Every structure is written in structure tokens, then in C-alpha cells.
Image (cartoon, coloured by chain):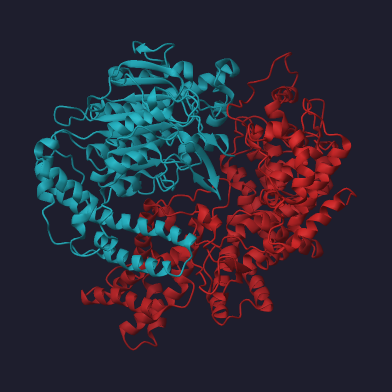
Amino acid sequence: MSKSLLPILLIANALLSQRGFADDGGGAFAKELRPLLEEHCFKCHGEKKQKGGVELASFANEDAVLKKYKLWRGVLEQVELKDMPPDDETPLNDAERTKLLGGIRGTLALLETDHPSLRDPGPGDLRRLSRAEYNNSIRDLLGIEFDAAKEVGMPEDNTGDGYANLASALIIPPVVMEKYFDAADAILARLYSDPDTKSPNKKRDEAAFKTLFEKATTDREGARALLSRLIRVAFRRPAETAEIERALEFFDGAIARNDPFPSAIRRAIKPLLVSPNFLYRVEENRATENSRSVYRVSDVELASRLSYFLWSSAPDEGLLALAEKNELSKPENLDAQIKRMLADPKAKALTENFTTKWLQLDKLETARPSTEFFPSFNNDMKKAMRAEVVTFCEKLREEDHSILDLLNADYTYANEALAKEYGIAGVTGKELQRVALKPENHRGGILGMGGILAETSHTNRTSPTKRGKYVLEVIFGTPPAPPPANAGMFKDEKKTKEPKDFREKLAQHASDATCAGCHRKLDPLGFGLDNYDAIGAWRETSADLDTSGVLPSGVKFSGAVELKKVLWSKRDEFERNVVEQMLTYALGRQLDYYDVRSVSKIKAGLDRDGHKFSTLVRGIVNSYGFLNRRNSDSADSVAAN
Amino acid sequence: MHSPTLSRRNFLRGAGALLTLPFMESLTRVSAFGASAVAKPPLRMGIFTVTGGTVLESWKLPTGGPLTKLPSILRALDFCKDDLLLLTGLANDGHCDNLNGHESCAFTHLSATEKAMRVGGKPVASISVDQAVAEVAGRETLLPSLEFGLTGGENVYSFKRDGSTVPYESDPRLVFDRMFRGRTPGVPNWSHRAENLAAATKPGAKSESYDRSVCDLVLDDAKSLQRKLGRGDQQKLDQYLTAVRAVEQKLGFIESRHRLDLLEAQNPGPSKLQIDARFTDEKSKYLWKNTEAVRHDPERHGDYISLMADLMVLAFQTDTTRVCTFAAGSDEAMFPGVVTVGYERHCHTLEHQGNSFTPSDADPISREACRQIHAWYTSLFAEMVRKMKAIDEGGSTLLDNSMLLFTSYMADGGHGREECPALLVGNAGGTLKGGRQIDFQKKTPVANLYIEMLNRMGAKTDRFGNSETAKGAAYGGRLPDLV
């Protein structure tokens, strides 16, 4: 820690006893830093002008800075790299720069403290099931594998680049409600055959009924047993007597009209499938708590949080039974359940809905390289490439590997065709298999996988920019700002001379001031990966292929092997990003300033324990935001609606 | 609008419930005015919006005036030149907060919103023109509005007043099903509409409906749940309640609409319905479940667009809805065969290389490819227009009674929002005079166009989106000289 940082930290620490970080005067930030910012930054980032959408003048104290910590991390980076202030503005002298950097770092360091104002689990909002969660919940409720959401055209949940389970984006417009009704009909049509039909499910249904009715003296008692069980699983909590009775009314009405037993049951089930208790994950407010107090979620609520995190589905009997006895939250039980759940095939959902989504594997489907230029990039190859990434992520979970394997590993999964593409001999057959990698294979980790390299390429060539963006966005969680409107492919270069090659062409394009800021971060990373062609085959650096790069920090490298070493040296940042990504997914909301310390804590746990996948999951489950909630009355949860 | 004095309970429950449903309100109101009030077919609004912007110099003439020779992208519409009103100079410059280029264009496209963003992943913009029209023109039809097109990143175009987005249906079978399940498609005879309405709305016994009792039960669930939730969650649950009520309302609509259909079948309108077998036959049921093939194969893509366009025609012809938006095309589509120049066939790449705002910045081969793609879109749109022009509604054609907007969510392939393409097609019941290109002053808000459309559709207003706050705010929020 530099000496200049100390006084600021001391002032900040003095403030820790208060509710917010800032005193009324705005704290150290207002006294020490604001004058500097005013002199050097406000001209372009003040009230009048907000270049690049960045506005700094409204920040009056530490609290405000912390709430926008991502913006200020960006400020920090720009000042560190001497990108800001720009050359044509009053420069910061060394003392000023040191003071500014130390001050911002010191302020952001407050996020790691245990200050009371950071003890916030975030808004624990009512959450609609995502499309995947809906399908899985139906599967586990009724035992039918059937993509009802697809059958009725349930719209994809629109969360942009976010995970599909982001609470605030999961709305129910009328059209979607209609779809839930349609889906319920489609599901029930496949459930419990009528006696006079020749349904292929008849045997299964008869068996199911038999077990239920062995103990029941009458049909109605059997129906009651069945419906009680279904309500409990559908609503993920014990069924209330009134709920069972109302379901039975539907059953009775149908029987009175001489409906056969199965269709009477179906009529009693449909309301469950469109009930808010099923479609939403409900966490009730506690009347005894005020809007600021934080409390542990109940065990029954925890069961749902856990099962939707790891399985994208409802809790099973094991979880529910434990939760109803209030024993799930006991640390040893929780630990055992996590272990059991991660080993269950249902945990594949974590790979499907989290890991591969984070890695943006969906983009492989519309990858651009064409067979005209890359004859081997056919559908089978695409499938194998996809399977490589999926299997790698699945094994990460199943075999509990280090999450750093994603950055660098000495194994991967390939079939014969893919291995051939990679130049690896000795792999035969169509089946994917584990392949040990040697240094001369130049692979290991996500950035050496064909699928990722292909989905970041163009029709006939690699795209250093897109690959660079992938590294920043996916690997490090620091995406560049979107390009400005009207940014063309290669439109705005001032052609002082014809570019001699692609690199020069791109450099000309990126010389424009509005583009340069991001391209100088993106392009070098991408050029480093240019040893892989547009579909990921290795090629050596040559006269035609210049894979050298200089990062904004001044670090130089040449080629993918050296670049990988550079990335490996930043594995802490990568790991931090993995934690942030999975925590976002687990909480179903975007992270906020009060989550920073949870992320640090989880990461510290990983560093102690070989970076194991299961350690990451356990760290998240035991994090503050996952175990706690507050009543949903506070201003921010209202605003999020 | 619902009467504010109507209690929710009365609105939803009890034997008299049906009489208070908006559809029935409008029916009784209309029949009270007598036959003359409805002898004229109603005005329909259709938005046919393609991806990828347009290629400006091939989309419009160098200067405004009579449309003598059509620009090359629009040439397929030559047969209805007099029905075309080409509007230039419109821009959509609402502020976008940290959205990517496509999202910026998509969220502002039909909303002309002052500010668009994502909050917690959720898209945010002000109400879009289609939904604002549906609030008024949608009260009298089975479906207030209809939205369909390929699902993808691009088509987040429609926003409701409460801020929710309206999903687009991608499976033509399911759209057809939404329109006609529980009824027999028929063509209204507009000169008999009033008496048929009067007969159909005679108070009758409310039929017992299973789904309605399902609604009752889950509404009870939701209400008892609300008592246990905090304020933030209650608002979320309000959305659920509204959605269930809409389902319930539609159940009522279907019943009364079915009665009306039966009456109208006895003296149907002069036109015949043409229903593609793929909407109904068993073997096509799963044809469009996966639309991936559409993206790879222009033949499938063309088929898909034609089929979807048919749905818009059917929706208007049968008066199932009067507001319809079709998001056609896909930036991710491949166009072998449609594009015959160069080697690149991937639409998005072509847009970036060839479709910048200034032609001199573009790669000429890619620009020609973009032009070919847009001419192809127009040819499919033109087939829809041709069908509408051939449908007789009793002295006037369906096209005469429609106002179609042919547009794109971007102005050009570089995510531009200046010079938005806007072509109005149809006579709009005599409120548009075609055969012309009108050049408005640069950066006139596209919101002005939406205000013109809203007013024609009966949603009277003098402001919309950023019509007053846009940099180029002009003409008092209107577009002069359209008629």
C-alpha cells in the first residue's frame, strides 16, 4: 500500500461507525479528491458535457462512489493507464496522479469492509420461473419429459446479455399467461390416460395409480393423496388444507358429471400449473421485520434457492423433508445436500443455464465461417465443437476440477474429426473422449477450443476485435462499451495510404479517437490469438501472420502461447469474474456494491482450496446474499419493478 | 378504457360479468348507433418491419414529388404505386443508455422513446405506437393486437404503457391458433355488421366455463398471496392479476365472438378466405417449431415471411384484430441466391460492410448485396399488399381500409437512426394520398409519423414519445400534407 493512501483510509475508517460511509461534509472524497476531479475531469465529464456517457460531477461523497463502483473502477483504470485526462487537457502531475489513484483505490477498498451499510442481501424479489425452470419443474412434478414451453411457443425470456433467470426481467404479460394456460393443457393431455384410450402411457399410469391407491379406501381418498403430494411439490412447501379442499372441488365436480377418474384428476391439476404459487418462487414478507432489517431465509425458502440454483428446478423430497424439519440450514446438512445435488444428473442444468451461457456458447449456432472457405466446418464439426465445451464444463462439475482449468488445462475432449482439426493424432471414432494435451498441441482451456474461436470469427477470416472482446467480456467480465452508432466496419479510416495488410487496415480504422479507446484494448488480445485460424486450427507465426501485441499496460507478447502466459498471470481477475458470474446467476439479479465483499470472500475460499468447482458452489450458497433476505418494501426493489 | 367506477369484483365475477366486458360494451354502444355507424369497414393498421435498415439511395428518390419511377428497392410495389406514400427525413434519436447498437435501434423503433435502457436486464422504453393504438382500436376485436416474427435479439419493439415488453410469436401455427381456436374463420359483411352485433350481444346465459373457474381460483390464490408480500412484490403480482384477467376476458370474447361468427356466416362478406393448409394440417404441426432453417435457407425464409404475411391479411380480413406488427427478417440470416454478388452471404456482416449511412464509406459489393436483400424483402411485402388489394370489403378493398407501414428498425446497417425508412401503403380510409414522396426537414422525429397514425386509428393525441423533446422536433408534432 502506498503511503499516500494511508491518510485517506484512516479518514474512511473513522467514518465506519456511522450508518453510511460519508459524514455530512461528504467525507475524504469531497475534501481530497473532488477538487482534483473538478480541475481535470469535469470539463468533459461534468454537468454540461458527459463524454462517453461518463459523468463525475454529481458524486458528492464516498457512498455515491461506492454505489457506482464499476464506473469508478473504470475511472481508476483510465487514470492508471494515463488514458485520462487526454493529451489535449491539463495533465495531472505525478503527485496529483498518485493522490487521485490512491484516493479512488482507498474509497473502493471500503467495499471490502464489514461496515453495517454493506450488510445488505439485495432485493429478494418474487421471481417468475424462467422457461428452463418451468420445464424442469414440470418434469419433476409430473414425471414427464416434455418441452411444453416450446410446444406452445413460450417466448424466450428477454434479459439481453444477462442470464435468463434475472428476476426483474421475468415478467408476465397477458400473452405469456395465455401460454401458461396452453402449456398446462398440453401437459395434461399427456398425463394419465383415460381408461378407454390406447395411450402408450397407460401402463405407467396404472402403475402410478396403483401405488397411490393401495392405501386409499375410496377414489376420493386416492385423489386427495395425489393432490396433496402434487401441491406440496408444485408450491415447494407443505400444502394447506384449504388448498387441498379446493383442488378436490374440481375433482368432485368432474366426477359428478361422470368424467372418468383420470380426467377428473387432470381438471384438479390445471389450476396448480397456472397458480402464482407455482409460477413464482414466493418468499413471504415477515410482519415482524422492518424494511431495513435483514434475516435468514427460512429453510423451506432455502430449499428452493438451492434447487433452482443447482438444478433449475423444484426441490425434491429429500430437500423438502429436511427443510420442513428446519434442518437444512445446519452447516453439515447444507454441505451434504450441496454434495448430493452436484452429483445428481439434474445438476446438468447448471452447465446448461449457467456455465455455457456465461461462455456465450449459444453463438456457435450462428457462427459465420462458411464451408466455402473452411470445408471441414460442417454441422458435425460444429456439434463436436459444442460438445467439447459442454463436456469440459460438465466434467468440471462432475469431477470437481479447478475452475482455473477453464483458463489453462492439459486435457480436453474431442472426437476423431475434431482432434484431426487440432492436429492431435491417435483419437478415433465419432464419440467424444478425453484427450491429454501436450505443449506442442498449443491448447488447453476455453480459448483454445474450436467452438469459441469459430464463433468469434467472420465468414472468411478471424476477427481479432471479436476475440479481444470475448477475452475482456467473458474471461475478465470487463466488456468494452458498445461501439458508437454509425461505427462502420471499415468506414472512417482516412486513407493516407493503402493499408499493406489487415493489421494496418484495422489500425487505420481504430485511429479515430472515438474508436481507439476500446480497440487498443481489444485488438492486441485478438491478434495474439491469431495463431488459431477462423475455425481454431493452429498455424505458426510467419511473415504473413503477425501475432505480436502490446497491451495498454505496456506488456508485450508474441503469439498465443505468450498471450496465454499473460492471461494466466491475471488468473486472479479471471477467478474473481467467475465468482461474480456465478453469484449473479445464483441470486438471479445483477450484483451491486454490497456484494463486492461476498465475492472477495468466496474467492479467498477458492484460493485456499485448489479453486475447486464445488468450493465455488459452496462459497456461493454460504454467501450473505444467498442465505439472507429483507422485506420487499424498500425503495430499490420497488424501482426494479 | 374500463370504467373506473367499476369494481374489480363486478368486473370479473357474477352472472352479469359478460355485459361489463369491454368487447360487449363496444358492441352495445355500436348497435345503439344503428347500422350506419358501422356500415363502413374499420381502419386497420399493419406494421411490416424488416431488419437491417435500408440502402438509402435505392430506397428513395433524390427529391420528393410524384412517384414516377420507383427506387429499385421498392420496384416490386409498382402495381400499387398510387397507394404509396414515401416519407423521408425522419429520425429516431432517443437517448440510449449503455445498449448495444441493435438494442438501441430496437427499443426506440416503435416507441420513439425519449430514453431507452435495460434495468436489471429488463428492457425499458415508453409505450410503442402499436400498443398505444391497440389500447383504443383493440377494444372491439378478439385480440387487441397481434405481434409476430422470428424470435431473436432484434424484435424487442413493442412496449406496453406499464413498461412491459410484448413478446413476438415465431410459430405461424400458434398465431393462427391464437386467432381462431374455438371459432370458425369467417368474413364479416360490413353492411350487416350492426344487426349481427345486436343479435350476438343479446343477453344470454353465461356458459359454464372450466377455464373461467380456473381463473377464479388462481385469482384467489394471488389475492391471498398479496397479503403476505411486500410492496415491491405486490406490484409484480399485480402484473400476474392483470394477465389472468386478460385471459379471463378473452374467454368471454371468444364466446361472444363465436356467436357473432355464426351469424356472419349466414350472410358473409364478398371476399373469400384463403387459408394455407400449413396452418391447419397435421403434418405441418411441427414445421416451424425450429426456425433455425429459416436463417440458413432463403427459400424457407421466403416461405416463412409469406405465411406470416398471410396471417396479417387473415387477421384484418376476419376482423380478428385491427392492429398487427410483423417483424420480418433476421440480421443473422444467410442469403445465398438472394445475394448474387461477392462471396459474403451473412446479412449482419454485409450490413456492417456495405450499409453505412454514407455510400462512399461502404464496400460497394456489400452495399449491392444489401440492396438485393431489401429488394427481396419488398417483393414479399408486395405479395401481401397485392392480396389486400384484391380483397373486396363491399365497395372498397382491404387495402383501402388499411394503413400499412413498411419500415425497418434501423436506418442503415451501421445502427444508424437518421433517415429511418418509412413507407405508408394504403388509402387509410381516405386519410392518405399516395403516389408521392414527401421530404420532411432533416431529423423530423419519427414520433410525428406515429402521431399521425395514432390519430387516424382513433387514438387522438398531439404528442408521443420524444415528439416534443427530440432535437429535430418540428411541425408541431405532426406531418403536414399527408392527404
Please state the horizontal and vertical placement of residue A155, each as a whole percent of the image: 44, 50
Q: Is residue A621 toward the left or the right of residue B163 in the image?
A: right
* Count of numbered labels shown in the rendering: 0
* Drawn side of residue B439 relative to residue B278, left or right: right
Tell me where residue B24 appears, x and y as whole percent: 19, 51
Left or right of A539 on screen, residue B476: left
User: In the rendered view, would you say B140 is above or below B78?
Assistant: below
Query: Which one is in front, A22 or B155?
Result: A22
Residue B68, quarter of picture = top left
Above or below — where is B173 with respect to A338?
above
Single out the residue that lies furthest toward the right: A3
Q: Quadrant of residue B473?
A: top left
Q: Position of residue A73 (x, y in %)?
A: 73, 45
Chain identifier, colour red: A
The furthest residue to the front? A25
Whether residue A401 appears in this view of the structure is no
Q: Is residue B195 above or below residue B478?
A: below
Please name whichever residue, A291 or A539, is drawn nearer the observer in this view of the structure: A291
Q: Please state the horizontal and vertical placement of residue A304, each as a whole percent of the image.
A: 55, 69
**Closest to the observer, B111 or A178:** B111
Say if residue B210 shows up in the picture. yes
Chain represented in cyan: B
| Quarter holding residue A277 | bottom left
From the viewer's side, name the closer residue of A180 and A415: A180
Name the residue located 9 percent from the left edge and 49 percent from the top edge.
B199
